């Protein structure tokens, strides 16, 4: 059973290029807070591609992840570019930046890797850390996805993978009602469900799948 710390030692599990959605979200924040140097939290930053992007765009970058190797990789990326970022090893239920107020935060393909209770704690921490009008963007897997129901069920809509590179990793799947409940005290700026239907795939295709999965994308405002 691999851990995130072990996965981030293998280059094949490390994403290099930033998501266009994250770049556009940062540009959106620049429009909301014009002329300001923003403080932006890359929540569950993994190997650091988006923390690097925040710093490259001239803002105060903060990154946290449970993986020590992920944070080490992020630090190396930042230092190689002569940039700076505030980096912490932390579980997603913890706030490693107490007292820091953020203009924005985002979590890409990470927040759903936990139980419902812990995801709720994480989102509450983010909400409490944002300034008034601050925004959070997240991607979350959908109950319509092909992986729903695979693995050991540990609670409603949460399954732990039993094979492949994510063996032992929990996946919580969201339907519309679940998303609305999770973000109940937020103002929804945009909520989109992207549905991908895989018609054919070889046995090991999903180990290195270049295509998107069925998921929710949300931007919410405090």
Image: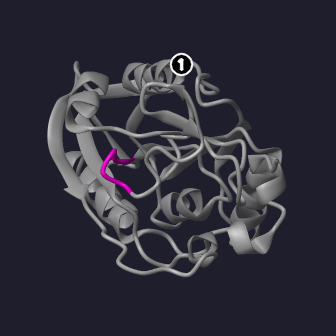
Query: Is residue 111 visible in this depiction of the protein?
Result: yes
User: What segment carries the magenta color?
Assistant: 141-145
Query: Is residue 35 visible in this depiction of the protein?
Result: no
For the point 27% across and 33% down, the residue is 179
| Mark 1: secondary structure | loop
Q: Nearer the viewer, residue 210 or 54?
A: 210
The quarter holding residue 12 reads: bottom right
139 displayed left or right of 115: left
For the point 53% across and 22% down, the residue is 118
- Residue 221 on image: x %, y %: 23, 34
Q: Residues within 10 Å of mark 1 (few under 14, many from 20)?
A: few
Colouring mode (rainbow / by chain / secondary structure / one colour): one colour
Q: Which residue is mark 1?
A: 99
Q: Nearer the viewer, residue 68 or 31?
A: 68
For the point 55% across and 49% down, the residue is 61
* Chief secondary structure of the magenta portion: loop
The quarter holding residue 159 reads: top right
């Amino acid at each position: 059973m691999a851990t995130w710390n072990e996965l981030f030692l293998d280059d094949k599990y490390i994403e290099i290029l930033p998501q266009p959605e994250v770049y556009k979200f940062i540009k959106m924040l620049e429009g909301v807070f014009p002329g300001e140097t923003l403080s932006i939290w890359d929540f569950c930053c993994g190997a650091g591609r988006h923390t690097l992007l925040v710093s490259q765009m001239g803002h105060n970058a903060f990154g946290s992840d449970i993986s020590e190797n992920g944070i080490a990789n992020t630090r190396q990326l930042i230092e190689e570019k002569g940039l700076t970022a505030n980096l912490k090893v932390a579980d997603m239920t913890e706030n490693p930046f107490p007292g820091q107020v953020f203009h924005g935060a985002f979590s890409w393909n990470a927040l759903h890797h936990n139980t419902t209770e812990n995801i709720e704690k994480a989102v509450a921490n983010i909400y409490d850390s944002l300034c008034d009008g601050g925004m959070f963007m997240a991607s979350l897997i959908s109950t319509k996805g092909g992986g729903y129901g695979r693995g050991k069920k540990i609670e409603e809509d949460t399954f732990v993978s039993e094979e492949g590179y994510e063996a032992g990793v929990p996946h919580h799947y969201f339907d519309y009602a679940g998303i609305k409940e999770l973000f109940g005290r937020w103002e929804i700026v945009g909520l989109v469900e992207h549905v991908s239907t895989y018609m054919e795939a070889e046995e090991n295709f999903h180990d290195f799948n270049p295509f998107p999965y069925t998921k929710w994308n949300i931007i919410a405002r405090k």
